[in-house]
Image (cartoon, rainbow, N blue to C red):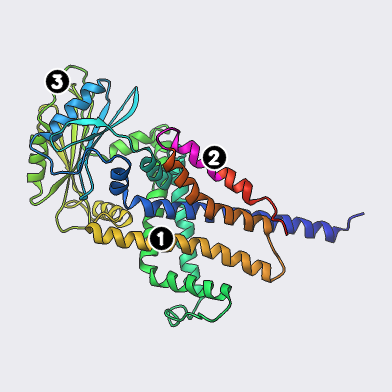
Amino acid sequence: MVSETARAERFTARALAGHSAVGLTVAALAYLICLTGTLAVFTDELKLLEQPAPAPALLQAGAIDRAARAALDQAPDTATLYALAPSTAAGRLTLTSYGPGGQQDWLADAAGNIRPARTPWTGFVDDLHMTLTAPAPWGALAVGLVGVAMLSLILSGVLAHPRIFRDAFRLRLGAPRRLREADLHNRMSIWGLPFHLAISLTGAFFGIASLPVMAIAALQFHGDAERVYRSLSGPEIPADSRPAALPDLDDIAARARAELPGSTLYYLGVERPGSAGMRIRVEVTGPGRLPRGDQIFFDAAGSEIGRVGFVTGSAGLQLYSGAAQVHFGFWGGLPVRIAYGVLGAALTWITASGVTIWLARRRDRGRPAPVLERAWHGWTRGVPLALAAAWLLSGVASVAAVFWATALLLQVAAQRPRRR
């Protein structure tokens, strides 16, 4: 018969294995989020690589209005149309339509002539970073919880190494490989500490922001979270299906910019276009301020009906908008985005090396986890290869299907025992 002690030991071993597997899963998601976030900093450049035409250029007068009307002609059942203005030197005017027929995307040239957008890989990378391609709001919530875990790991890592600041530039180059990797892991962690804290804190903030929204929706709006968001998104206009002509959108954008001197257009959205219940939202960026900009609202007649001041409003609104700018790195031009790219790549390596070091220490202490080791190596090597495969095949196959299938196949391959 098996003794009670043996049963307890087996139970403890299984519990520890389960605990390690959960921790490894969180680390795997953190690695994926860090890697895709680093790529997402260069969204405009990646889209330009994926679809070079039309070339980036300064918009001509009337380009936004012409592009929006052309998009509405191609998607007459549009419920909401967004026109996103170029925000970087590699950016182009993009339009997105949402309606019963689904989502449609276009790119516009300087004159406002549109063509379908063909950037599935970059869109997938952005979605993978922000939602893990999971349904709303669960994907964003999972990303936020991973951000919380990363923040706790960063803080506990600093507290667990009391000499980490004193040894900020100490590298034992002649030591064994594991010690060299541990030194580099610790040094890179401290060199980029302000960035790591800012990214994990803001990422956690935006991800778990859905929790109070879901609670309010359950208590006051019968679970309808959209009603909560609508109550925070500026003045409402009652739905009115009577036909109404679309006002001159370039003129509205110019009037919105005049409300915030020195500002530039960020985006323009038209809800219920072509109806008397139309609402037009324009966001203009504030010059020299970290918060992105104010949102100004217009009705079907082109009359201003209200404003949400992310630059000129309350401290809470400014904090919310500023946190978004800090997280995505679009507040200081190309030099800041390059710095984010370098620091993001370093954070991705730190995430990978931290788990590798932990697994090596387990092995050195006589508690090897070969299955977990193979899984981790398969993931950290497989994800970049899966992204590359998805890029190469994006013209002939679903990007999401290629990515997940490749990642799974490489994970299965990694679990095959190596021949001695």
Q: Is residue 114 left or right of residue 205?
A: left
Q: Is residue 188 left or right of residue 181?
A: left
Comparing marks 3 and 2, which lies closer to the viewer? 2
Circle number at residue 244: 3
Residue 24 at what x, y percent from top left?
Answer: 58, 56
Tell me the element at label 1. Answer: helix
| Separation of residues labelled 1 and 3 (CA atoms) | 50 Å
Residue in front for this viewpoint, 353 or 130? 353
Tell me the element at label 2. Answer: helix
Q: Answer above or below: position of 11 versus 190.
A: above
Give the mark, 3 or 2, whose residue is nearer the N terminus: 3
Residue under numbered circle 1: 345
Q: Is residue 112 visible?
A: yes
* Amino acid of disc 1: Ala
Q: Answer above or below: position of 90 versus 160.
A: above
> In which quadrant is the C terminus drawn?
bottom right
Q: Quadrant of residue 288?
A: bottom left
Q: Answer above or below: position of 361 versus 292.
A: below
Q: Residue furthest top?
A: 242
Give the mark, 1 or 2, whose residue is nearer the N terminus: 1
* Amino acid of disc 3: Ala
Q: Which residues are magenta?
A: 394-407
Q: Residue at x 52, y 41 (%)?
A: 404
Give the mark, 1 or 3, whose residue is nearer the N terminus: 3
Residue under numbered circle 2: 405
Q: Quick check: marks 3 and 2 in contact, CB under 8 Å?
A: no
Residue 268 at what x, y percent from top left?
Answer: 19, 37
Q: Residue at x 45, y 40 (%)?
A: 133
* Amino acid of disc 2: Ala
Q: Residue furthest right?
A: 1
Q: Is residue 96 left or right of residue 284?
A: right
Mark 3 residue crowding within 10 angstroms, few (<14) / some (14–19) / many (20+): some
